[in-house]
Image (cartoon, grey):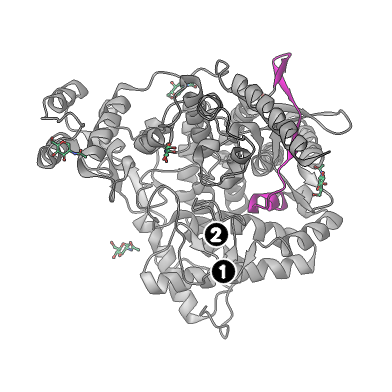
Amino acid sequence: MSKPHNSLHLTLLHILLLLAAAMTTSAPSPWPVDETAPLITFLELLQDAALATFGSKDFDPKFYIDLSLRFSLPVVEKAFNSLPKSRNGTVPPADLEGFIAKYFRSPGEDLVVVHPPDYVPEPEGFLPKVKHPGVRAWALEIHALWKNLSRGVSSSVRDQPELHTLLPLPEQFVIPGSRFREVYYWDSYWVIRGLLASKMYETAKGIVTNLIYLLDTYGHVLNGARVYYTNRSEPPLLSAMVRAIYSRTHDINLVKKAIPVLLKEHGFWTSGVHQIVVRDAHAESHCLSRYYAMWDKPRPESSTIDKESASNISNGAEKRQFYREVASTAESGWDFSTRWMSGNKIHLRTFLEKKKGIPLRKEQKRNPKDITTLKTTSILPVDLNAYILGMELDISFLAKVAGNHSVTKHFLEVSKAREKAIRAIFWNETKGQWFDYWINDHSSCKEGRLYEDGKQNQAVFASNFIPLWIKPFNSDEKLMDKVLRSLKSSGLLCHAGIATSLTNSGQQWDFPNGWAPIQHMIVEGLALSGSSDAKLLAEEIATRWIRTNFATYKKMGVMHEKYNVEKCGDYGGGGEYVPQTGFGWSNGVVLAFLEEFGWPQDQEIGC
Ligand SMILES: *[C@@H]1O[C@H](CO)[C@@H](O)[C@H](O)[C@H]1NC(C)=O
Ligand SMILES: *[C@@H]1O[C@H](CO)[C@@H](O)[C@H](O)[C@H]1NC(C)=O
Ligand SMILES: *[C@@H]1O[C@H](CO)[C@@H](O)[C@H](O)[C@H]1NC(C)=O
Ligand SMILES: *[C@@H]1O[C@H](CO)[C@@H](O)[C@H](O)[C@H]1NC(C)=O
Ligand SMILES: *[C@@H]1O[C@H](CO)[C@@H](O)[C@H](O)[C@H]1NC(C)=O
Ligand SMILES: *[C@@H]1O[C@H](CO)[C@@H](O)[C@H](O)[C@H]1NC(C)=O
């Protein structure tokens, strides 16, 4: 075939693909979305006015949605409406500042700093394998940070919930820190792992009690304890939290309380829009899950950012689909990353109209920086399905402990089916990794379930190795050998930890950032395997991670949310907000690593 002919052929094919995709994206959304609460709608208006008035420097939209009202909403709205406003939406800065001071309490004022009742400066039997005095002193400082990060909900939230976006919770909790002022879902798993190393069992149980309360109230565990997080979840690790606490405390009452709600959570992730049926190469069908937020508007806590990102999308249905992709990406915990981005823009129709006559092929290339190409709801994620497999095994284990044989047996069977699905759809024998599976846009609905074809995304992400964390995989010796070789040659293992991806996009879940939870799951998976080679690598990665956390802390006096894996002693950046400190899961992982691997007296700690 001659070259020009070939490219014409490709162009026509692409037009057809784009048209097909455009038709799907403008179809009515398959999941209803509720009206935004009046308080949220109003605080978004205030957010807009603040951005227009104060400018984008140091602007954090979440600050405004976290304000609580001093007076009823109608009173505050009336005062807001009578502020002098220019046609461009700005208010004289002094007027807006005065209005905020008079009518609102600062973010965080509806939380109270509490002393964790089970905190002691040096718990008995704390990190027995840490012999190096400098490392031990530092570990005690990290342990002491649980005091800085412990909070409860103030009585004003319980008395007048309509004045707050904060949700009331029955127990006190540990927050990640900085702008993350409330309790978060998947963060709590690593907070709890750290609390267990700190022997703070009551605080750990309190966090689980709160998450159980949210699950009971809303039908899923919320992303975080705010009204504006009610329509999405986060990576589901509640069962792992309960199991981790049980393994230390043997608290059977906690297990009994958790089982019925865990069954509810399992149902949430394995039904409706979250479940997809895919056929493998042998025409066998498998059920797998995806992230799918019940929301198709700007995320209230980042409303100004999302509206700006969507500003070039003119079609209403495409705009809503974009917002749904953004919220679903937040649900994945990986917000944001090239992992969820494709070359295909969501606003295909607009795009086709605008670019008529311009070669489409160029536009089809992946553009990792263009957030409007998010396709999260069309992706079956490796890690989510590994977590759900873990949940099924945990439920089976916990039900056995509680003496419920029917649940034990049922969840063992369910877990076998998911293990098989993960091996059939995600596993790539040639590459020795599990790849995300991108489903096609042309979906057909049969018997209320979606049947999908698609393909593996062969890009390298740390999530491709998360199944290592789950027992059926880390106990499979032959498979481990293959994965170990693949991990070592992946390019992800860096001087100061495991990189999130190989692409430097400026997004925070990409290169060169390393995140504590990712280090922990991969290290723990390697350490649990029977291979001595894998155990050595686990210790090596943990050691590098401890070094960079230590060096950064010594330099700056704080623990960070993420680190730069290329440079020992440097924190990570990128994304839509400034780097945060505190920090719940980083502290938890350092303590868990030091508990597992220790630090010999004579081992250097410097970078
Ligand atoms: C969104 O969250 C609100 C508040 O919890 C809830 O009432 C509503 O049912 C949720 N919407 C959907 C579509 O699930
Ligand atoms: C908005 O209008 C005000 C008052 O007319 C003016 O002082 C200000 O410079 C304008 N700001 C922008 C960004 O145009
Ligand atoms: C919108 O389109 C214009 C013109 O192509 C471009 O300069 C701008 O960066 C786009 N905005 C966003 C948020 O993508
Ligand atoms: C096992 O748990 C299920 C679900 O909570 C419950 O319906 C059933 O009664 C329990 N069976 C026993 C023997 O406790
Ligand atoms: C696994 O990877 C190889 C090499 O990249 C590729 O050719 C093959 O199609 C992949 N297998 C599946 C099942 O996608
Ligand atoms: C933790 O709290 C103590 C006591 O309030 C304070 O001195 C210290 O600076 C805090 N540490 C961090 C890292 O915020």
Q: Amino acid at mark 1?
A: Ala
Question: Is 378 placed above or below 490 here?
Answer: above
315 on left or right of 272: left
Mark 2 crowdedness (10 Å alpha carbons): few <14, some 14-19, many ≥20: many
Q: Is residue 452 magenta?
A: yes
First reached walking from the N terminus: tag 2 or tag 1: 1
- Residue 89 position, x and y percent, is 21, 31
- Residue 69 position, x and y percent, is 21, 32
Q: Which residue is mark 1?
A: 496
Mark 1 crowdedness (10 Å alpha carbons): few <14, some 14-19, many ≥20: many
Q: Amino acid at mark 2?
A: Gly
Secondary structure category for the residue under label 2: strand
Q: Which residue is mark 2?
A: 514
| Chain part drawn in magenta | 443-468
2 on left or right of 161: right
319 or 580, nearer to the observer: 319
Q: Which mark is residue 476?
A: none
- Residue 477 position, x and y percent, is 84, 57
505 or 233, nearer to the observer: 505
Q: Is residue 169 visible?
A: no
Question: Is 64 placed above or below 583 here?
Answer: above
